[in-house]
Image: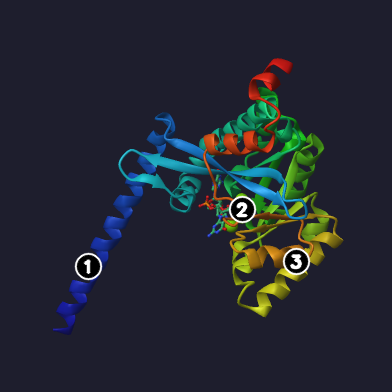
Amino acid sequence: RAKANGRARAELFDTTMHAQAMARLRLESELRRALERDEFRLVYQPIIALASGDVAGFEALVRWQHPTRGLVSPMEFIPVAEECGLILPLGDWVLRTACRQLRAWQATFPAAARMTMSVNIAPRQFAQPDLLERVRRVLVETDLEASCLKLEITETAAMGNAARTQEVLQALHALGVRLSIDDFGTGYSSLSYLRRFPLQTLKIDRSFIDGMDREQESREIVRGIIVLATTLGMDVVAEGAETQEQVAHLRELSCGFGQGYFFQRPADEATITGLLAAMAPEVAPEAAGAAS
Ligand code: C2E
Ligand code: MG
Ligand code: MG
Ligand code: MG
């Protein structure tokens, strides 16, 4: 009886594993096709200077417009793309599309001239031997000024091989690109890298901002991170600010920048174009186009 039960469980387990493996394989092959079929989209989320309320720039976030499943979250497909290597062509596409988009906005809206575009760089992309060359090529192709591009890397991607990381970041820095550490506080890392690597921006992970309204501890962690980053001369972005209270608190703590649903959800190109147009109503897009 017990044995039979055990066998049944083992079979059930096998079936589940098999189903998962199949689903995974299907996702992989669909992902490959998705690139060819042009099913990926970018959305853009504004990053706000908290003191002035101005839009300082945007973070580009990828979406997959699946023919039958609708919009698929990057949380679902980025890890798979990372594992099967598809993140390399996908990451190239994201980088090129995001740079081209900011350049187009800059050409139309004077208010966008000094805005930045932040692009997530996956660990496997960061490990590419020719990353620097790829970034340089995209900047030339899209005619975007290097200082307008911000690359976001996670602690995990940065900590793998500290000597190589130092070299790669230094080279990107020399190119004029800005560098951010993403999801700060969630990875394993030694704090000394903040001083060693040429990072301009630290993004406090959403989990800490989320706890601010409820827990004294989260507020203290956020305060500590802001003091640390400011002492090191870095800009700080609070990720995932959703409430008025959080934003008021972040302002009190002299946090420089915020990004979150409180300000704006990630939005498509047309929505952001509308937002930029509303920012400078005195400059008609046609006039700006004719002047350049
Ligand atoms: P991330 O880089 O930390 O991006 C911020 C995530 O927080 C985004 O989720 C954004 O939509 C979400 N977010 C922003 N404000 C709020 C808020 O107020 N509340 C809540 N609950 N969420 C907020 P998204 O777009 O689903 O992306 C998730 C993750 O997927 C990103 O986290 C990043 O790690 C990865 N990802 C997205 N696009 C790309 C990409 O083009 N390349 C790579 N390598 N990774 C990407
Ligand atoms: Mg990011
Ligand atoms: Mg983040
Ligand atoms: Mg995050």
* 49 relative position to 182: left or right: right
Q: Earlier in the sequence, mark 1 or mark 3?
A: 1
> Which kind of residue does numbered mark 3 sit on?
Ile
Tag count in the figure? 3
Q: Marks 2 and 1: CB-CB under 8 Å?
A: no
Q: Nearer the viewer, mark 2 or mark 1?
A: 2
Give the residue number, with chain letter if any, for mark 3: 225
Q: Which mark is residue 276?
A: none
| Dot 3 beta carbon under 8 Å from ligand 3 | no
Nearest the viewer among 78 and 72 is 72
Q: Which mark is residue 263?
A: 2
| Mark 3: secondary structure | helix
Q: Residues within 10 Å of mark 3 (few under 14, many from 20)?
A: some
Q: Which mark is residue 12?
A: 1
Nearest the viewer among 213 and 75 is 213
| Mark 2: secondary structure | loop
For image coordinates 71% across by 30% down, the residue present is: 282
Residue 119 in view (yes/no): no
* Image quadrant containing the C terminus: top right
| Mark 1: secondary structure | helix
> Which kind of residue does numbered mark 2 sit on?
Phe
Residue 212 in view (yes/no): yes
> Which kind of residue does numbered mark 1 sit on?
Leu
Toward the top, the furthest residue is 290
Residue 18, x across and y down, in percent: 27, 57
Separation of marks 2 and 1 at Cα, in angstroms = 47 Å
* Image quadrant containing the N terminus: bottom left
Q: Earlier in the sequence, mark 3 or mark 2?
A: 3
Q: Residues within 10 Å of mark 1 (few under 14, many from 20)?
A: few
Q: Nearer the viewer, mark 1 or mark 3?
A: 3
155 above or below 141? Answer: below
Separation of marks 3 and 2 at Cα, in angstroms = 22 Å
